[in-house]
Every structure is written in structure tokens, then in C-alpha cells.
């Protein structure tokens, strides 16, 4: 019984210590500042909003094409829409890769 109590005490201390460490790590992260320039890896607010609007436009196009694909009954036309959607996805992937490459070159 004494060993069991000791084991519970040790487990409680270890779990408390892990929670404490996790809280320290989460509070240690610096907050993203919207007013910093691109030189330090952060986007200013206007650039971020422009990027978000472009992402939104892309998502709306993808949803529109998905709806058209689902509504289309002709298999050939449906495949054409799928090919169009795939091309849009490829363009978006290339755009993101280009942005990541540019970001790596800045640092």
C-alpha cells in the first residue's frame, strides 16, 4: 500500500510538471505582429488581407466547379470540368511553391 501511494504521488508530480512545462512553452511563443514588414518573415496587414482575398477567390472557384461537376450528367462534360478543376489546383500549388521559394530566399 505504501508503494502504491508513492507511485501515485510520483505520477501526480510528473503530470503536474508536464502541464507546467506545456504552459511555459505556449506562453513563450511571440505573438504575430501585423505591423511588421516582410523582412522579418511577417506579412503586414494589407499584404495579408490581399493574400486572404486571393485564397478566398480560389476556394470559391473550386466550390463552384465542384457544384458544376456534381450537377453535370454528361460524363464527357463532367470530365472536362474535373480537368478544369485539376488545372486550377495545379496553378494554386505552383503559386504556393513559388511563394515558399521566395520566402526561403529572403531568409
Image (cartoon, rainbow, N blue to C red):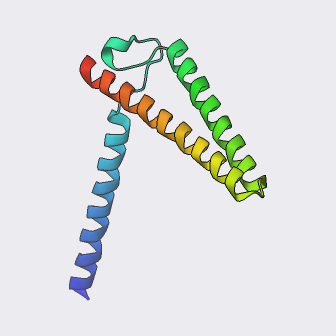
The image position of residue 105, as x and y in percent, is 25, 20
Q: Which residue shows up at 27% across the image and 17% down it?
A: 106
The percent coordinates of residue 71 (x first, y second) are 78, 53
Q: Which of the pair 81/5 is nearer the observer?
A: 81
Q: Nearer the viewer, residue 29 or 88?
A: 88
Left or right of residue 30, residue 74 in this image: right
Tell me where residue 24 sits by quadrant. top left
Residue 14 point in image, percent of width and height? 26, 63
Residue in the foreground of this view, choosing between 96 and 68: 68
Q: Choose top left, top right, bottom left or bottom right for residue 43.
A: top left
* Place of residue 60 in the rendered image (x, y in percent of width and height, measured from the top left): 68, 36
Vertical placement of 13 versus 61: above or below?
below
How many dots with numbers?
0
Is residue 30 among the parts visible in the rendering? no
Q: Is residue 40 visible?
A: yes
Residue at (49, 34) in percent of width and height: 92
For the residue pair 45 and 88, the one nearer the viewer reads as 88
Q: Residue at x 62, y 37 (%)?
A: 59
Q: Quadrant of the C terminus?
A: top left
Left of 39 or right of it: where is 91?
right
Position of residue 102 relative to residue 97, above or below, is above
Amino acid at each position: 500500500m505504501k508503494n502504491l501511494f508513492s507511485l501515485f504521488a510520483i505520477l501526480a508530480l510528473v503530470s503536474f510538471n508536464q502541464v507546467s512545462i506545456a504552459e511555459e512553452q505556449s506562453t513563450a511563443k511571440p505573438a504575430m505582429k501585423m505591423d511588421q514588414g516582410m523582412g522579418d518573415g511577417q506579412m503586414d496587414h494589407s499584404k495579408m488581407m490581399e493574400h486572404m482575398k486571393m485564397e478566398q477567390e480560389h476556394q470559391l472557384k473550386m466550390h463552384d466547379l465542384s457544384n458544376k461537376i456534381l450537377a453535370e450528367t454528361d460524363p464527357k462534360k463532367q470530365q472536362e470540368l474535373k480537368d478544369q478543376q485539376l488545372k486550377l489546383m495545379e496553378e494554386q500549388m505552383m503559386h504556393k511553391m513559388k511563394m515558399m521559394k521566395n520566402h526561403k530566399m529572403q531568409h
